[in-house]
Amino acid sequence: MPTYSQSDGHAPQAAVSAVGLRKSYGDKTVLAGIDLTIPAGSVFALLGPNGAGKTTTVQILSTLIAADGGQARVAGHDVATSPDGVRAAIGVTGQFSAVDGLITGEENMLLMADLHHLSKREGRRIAAELLERFALTEAAKKPAGTYSGGMRRRLDIAMTLVGDPRIIFLDEPTTGLDPRSRHNMWQIIRELVSGGVTVFLTTQYLEEADELADRIAVLNDGRIAAQGTADELKRLIPGGHVRLRFTDPAAHRRAASALREAPLPQAPGLAAEDAPADEALSLRIPSDGSQRELRSILDRLDSAGVEADELTVHTPDLDDVFFALTGGTSTPHQPKEAVR
């Protein structure tokens, strides 16, 4: 199992880091100097429209191609000067399956064991363990070409794990999978991370990044447009609000008056939504969804002696973030879920 070097004798280095990473093809700049820092044992998701440079980033960090400028370290090794050290610590699952459909699932696994120079006995043991872990034991003797898309993707990741990598690059691992297979893949990724593996994920699915990633970066025009947790990115985009619902019209009026008389910090304005008298009335208050603003709203309601029947906090989703940061340069091919 690869180990990470120590930068100061106390704290381990980041699993993956890059400073000023650049790459061009002719007169086309793909990466214009990106910076990344990914802690060990976390999931990092890289989002961006088609051609933004996501796959190029993965290829550079996994030593498949060389950068034109900048520095990158993976598992403590410089990708330019110590590529063998990087390769010993990582696994890569690309956009397109590396599975050989003409041989069986078991034979695919044993082939990977041979490539990692494992003994025949050790290779068979690891292959059997991984096939069982990925629920492929029953299909192990069948040609991989007969597998479903989800099974082939599971086999692809199982093959990646033969070398016991501590950092895994997953380049759009669930593209083309049905919802059930995609959710199964999410569970596999969570299990890998719980075992201490670091996952670098590129994805078309915003829901996927929201579900899995500890940190997300949005890549656009060769630059990192923004990065942070999903919640931090959502707070960058206007449109968040708190909605208060009332069944008593008098309480609704008192709340509206109290909140208008004391404008909320960083959230000016208040909108009352029309509703039939026999239905709940509501107020919509612009808000970034922070605890501070929510407490301010509740304090003002308490001062007015008003209690809302229902309170909900609405924040922009990652779709909103993506389109705001990339200028709407890509169209999701699945509503509210898919963007690349």
Image (spheres, grey):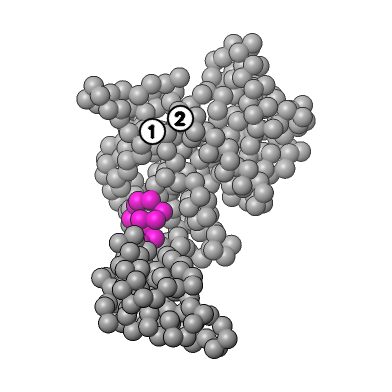
Is residue 294 found left or right of 333 in the rendered image? left
Specify the quadrant of the image occupied by residue 77. top left
What's the magenta region?
Answer: 226-236
| Residue 176, placed above or below residue 281 | above
Q: Position of residue 261 (x, y in %)?
A: 27, 82
Q: Residue at x 48, y 78 (%)?
A: 246
Three-letter amino acid code at the position of disc 1: Ala
Instruction: Report if residue 154 lies within the magenta region.
Output: no
Q: Residue at x 42, y 45 (%)?
A: 214
Is residue 58 found left or right of 120 in the rendered image? left
Residue 241 shows in the view: yes
Q: Are marks 1 and 2 in contact (CB under 8 Å)?
A: yes
SS for dot 1: loop
| Residue denoted by label 1 | 40
Q: CA distance from mark 1 to mark 2?
A: 7 Å
SS for dot 2: loop
Few, some or many residues within 10 Å of mark 2 (<14, 14–19, 20+): few
| Residue 36, placed above or below residue 163 | below
Is residue 124 found left or right of 246 in the rendered image? right
Is residue 49 found left or right of 174 in the rendered image? left
Three-letter amino acid code at the position of disc 2: Gly
| Residue denoted by label 2 | 196
Q: Residue at x 40, y 85 (%)?
A: 253
